[in-house]
Amino acid sequence: MEKPTNWNYDALAKELAENHDCDEATIPFLLEEARKRRDGEVIADLAEWFDDGEDHHRFLELATEAAELGSPRANFWLGNEYRWGTHLPRDFEKAFACYQRCDDYDWVPIDPEENTEYEIDGEVEVTADMLLSDSGGDIGWWLFVLEKHPSRSLKCGMADWFMKQGGDENRERALKLLEESANDGFEFAFLKLLEFYSSGDFKDIEKGRHWFYKAEEHGFDEACFADALGVESLECRKLKAAADLGDRKAAAKLACAYLHGGYGDYICCAKDEALARQYGVLASLDEDGMDELIAGLDVNSVQDGKFLSDLSKN
């Protein structure tokens, strides 16, 4: 077969990549030239063209060739084929190896830490529901990946899965994975540990406080658990340090916090009238502190009105 007239490799390759359109008569020449140039992406485009035509044998043949030339897409496709066993024998080892060669593809399922939809401060949460949804109900793949690629978020997600299975052994394995994930600095692991130890059948204040302060070491202020654990939040202790050094505005916020049993979302503490008065007196020593104190109190509240009245007598 002769090469078509006005044949242009770059133009045909671009048309194929952008529109998945290709004259079947040009495929042998396009493939031949792509092989000469070791152009894995064009071979991958051709593989996709055959897949669209449901020629799975030809698709796998060209996808394998493109993958060997380093095409991330082709490695991703082969990873899926080996993972699911759709047109190739199921083989997690081969699937994992293929996925490792497609790091710059849009979504690489070996590392959910970077590719799930739940995010907080740049980190993501992997839950058992997400794992099962993604794996079609077959957790075997994720158990395999946990051994091969134990990212901190995957540990967190697998811990969730083990916890839902019930039983002492599964619970202990779940807690071990959460502890490993937390010690690696994954915030969701701290949240799950604090939730576990601050309430429910396994409430353990001592362990809860341990992970509360451990979270702080990693820069996380989990103030929402402070009340349940009977501790002051990090922001509260920061204010106390500032107030003790003479910061009148900090003292005002502390006075409000001790008077009401908390102030805002992150200043958490138990009610303490003596400390409220101590820091209220300190705040009232200058105008800025007094303004901050008034701004934090409810002038229509009998309690707050009496508090201000008592301070003014000093």
Image (cartoon, helix red, strand yellow):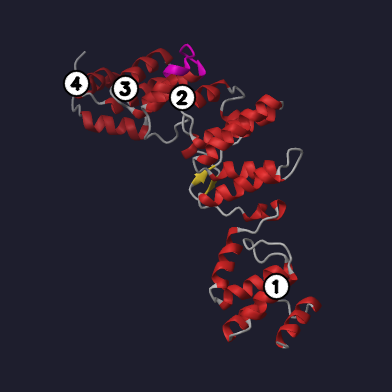
Q: Is residue 187 above or below residue 110?
A: below
Residue placed under numbered mark 1 in the picture: 276
Q: Single out the mark in the foreground, 2 or 1.
A: 1
Name the foreground residue: 25 vs 191.
191
Instruction: Say which amino acid is labelled 1.
Output: Ala
Q: Single out the mark in the foreground, 1 or 3.
A: 1
Q: Is residue 199 above or below residue 234?
A: above
Q: Which residues are magenta?
A: 84-94
Per the image, is 85 magenta? Answer: yes
Dots 4 and 2: beta carbons under 8 Å?
Answer: no
Seen in the image, is 54 located left or right of residue 241? Answer: left
- How much space separates mark 4 and mark 1, taking CA atoms? 80 Å
Q: Single out the mark in the foreground, 2 or 3.
A: 2
- How much space separates mark 2 and mark 3, taking CA atoms? 25 Å
First in sequence: mark 4 vs mark 1: 4
- How much space separates mark 3 and mark 4, taking CA atoms? 13 Å
First in sequence: mark 2 vs mark 3: 3
| Residue shown at 59% from the left, 44% from the top | 190
Residue placed under numbered mark 4 in the picture: 36
- How much space separates mark 2 and mark 1, taking CA atoms? 54 Å
Instruction: Say which amino acid is labelled 2.
Output: Lys
Dots 4 and 1: beta carbons under 8 Å?
Answer: no
First in sequence: mark 4 vs mark 2: 4
Farthest residue in the right direction? 302
Dots 2 and 1: beta carbons under 8 Å?
Answer: no
